[in-house]
Image (tube, coloured by chain):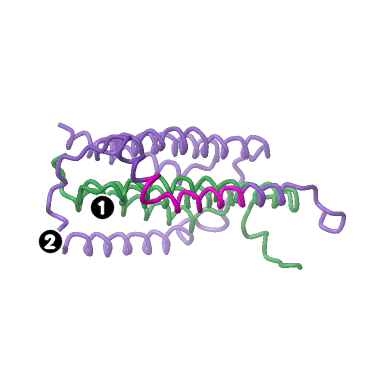
Chain colours: A green, B purple
């Protein structure tokens, strides 16, 4: 690989900003979760690029751990999506504005 | 050659992600995201991480995104986001915020002298990753396995039928 480290970081930053835009722009809860996934992928790109730059194994380990953590997060988040759907029959985030114990 | 491939894949990834975040239909968005993840997996391979690349395809594209698709299809989500009022009032501040954040990040990255140094040739066989993962990081693996268990229990609790008052 003969690319500068900064270019790999720039791709990751662009991916992260796209994910952030998705979270802020979209109103469906599912699309907000998709934005979170995009941001997590940007983080794992940074980890893997850093691993190659410093020639160390640790970055790749953290990328793998990030995947496991994302799998757990998605399981809970999608269960919540199904719960919200059963409650209000919609997934537009603006609808969910009340709390009750 | 591999550097050129890296840039091509990077732009494919960004284009697929951009298409993903602008689709009305959630199914189309998830399919574009899978395309983006495939490009990202090959980028991981080029950066010397074949195991992470395989996991990216198997876990992200194969499991997590299929779970998204499954939920979208189970709930029968239609493309229902209808913007209210002029579109640019929603888009404008966001694009301004995102682009300013992007410019600041790029300036921060490229003012560092390390940014222009090249990534050397690097290839890490899955065996070395496994040895580090179950050697030095064995405790972290255990903690993550607990976390997966708790997530399963949490998903089960959320999936139980609603009580009468909540309906």
Residue A35 location, x and y as percent? 47, 51
Can you say which quadrant of the picture contains the C terminus of chain B? bottom right
Q: Which residue does the image show at 63% across and 60% down from the upper left?
A: A94
Q: Which mark is residue A90?
A: none
Q: Which residue does the image show at 19% across and 40% down from the upper left?
A: B122
Q: Is residue B37 above or below residue A15?
A: above
Residue at label 2? B113
Q: Nearer the viewer, residue B49 or B126?
A: B126
Residue A22 location, x and y as percent? 46, 52
Q: Is residue B57 above or below residue A33?
A: above
Residue at label 1? A9
Residue with the most extreme front position? B135
Residue B12 location, x and y as percent? 31, 37
Q: Quadrant of residue B38?
A: top left
Q: What stretch is highlighted in magenta?
A: B133-151
User: Which chain contains the residue that carries disc 1?
Assistant: A
Does the CB distance between marks 2 and 1 fall below 8 Å?
A: no
- As measured in the structure, the alpha-carbon distance from the residue carrying label 2 to the one carrying label 1 is 13 Å
Q: Is residue B49 left or right of residue B55?
A: left
Q: Which residue does the image show at 59% across and 46% down from the upper left?
A: A75
């Amino acid at each position: 690989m003969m690319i500068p480290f900064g270019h790999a970081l720039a791709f990751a930053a662009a991916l992260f900003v796209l994910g952030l835009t998705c979270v802020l722009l979209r109103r469906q809860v599912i699309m907000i979760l998709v934005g979170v996934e995009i941001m997590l992928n940007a983080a794992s790109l940074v980890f893997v690029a850093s691993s190659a730059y410093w020639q160390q194994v640790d970055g790749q380990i953290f990328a793998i751990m990030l995947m496991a953590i994302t799998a757990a997060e998605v399981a809970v988040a999608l269960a919540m999506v199904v719960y919200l759907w059963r409650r209000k029959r919609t997934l537009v985030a603006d609808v969910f504005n009340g709390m009750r114990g | 050659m591999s550097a050129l491939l890296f840039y091509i894949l990077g732009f494919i990834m960004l284009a697929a992600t951009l298409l993903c975040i602008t689709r009305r239909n959630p199914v189309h968005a998830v399919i574009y995201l899978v395309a983006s993840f495939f490009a990202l997996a090959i980028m991981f391979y080029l950066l010397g991480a074949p195991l992470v690349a395989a996991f990216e395809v198997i876990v992200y594209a194969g499991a997590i995104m299929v779970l998204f698709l499954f939920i979208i299809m189970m709930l029968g989500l239609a493309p229902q986001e209808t913007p209210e009022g002029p579109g640019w009032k929603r888009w404008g501040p966001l694009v301004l915020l995102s682009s300013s954040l992007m410019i600041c990040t790029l300036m921060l990255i490229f003012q560092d002298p390390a940014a222009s140094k090249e990534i050397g040739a690097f290839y890490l066989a899955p065996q070395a990753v496994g040895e580090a993962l179950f050697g030095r990081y064995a405790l972290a693996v255990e903690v993550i396995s607990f976390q997966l268990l708790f997530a399963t229990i949490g998903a089960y609790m959320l999936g139980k039928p609603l009580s009468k008052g909540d309906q």
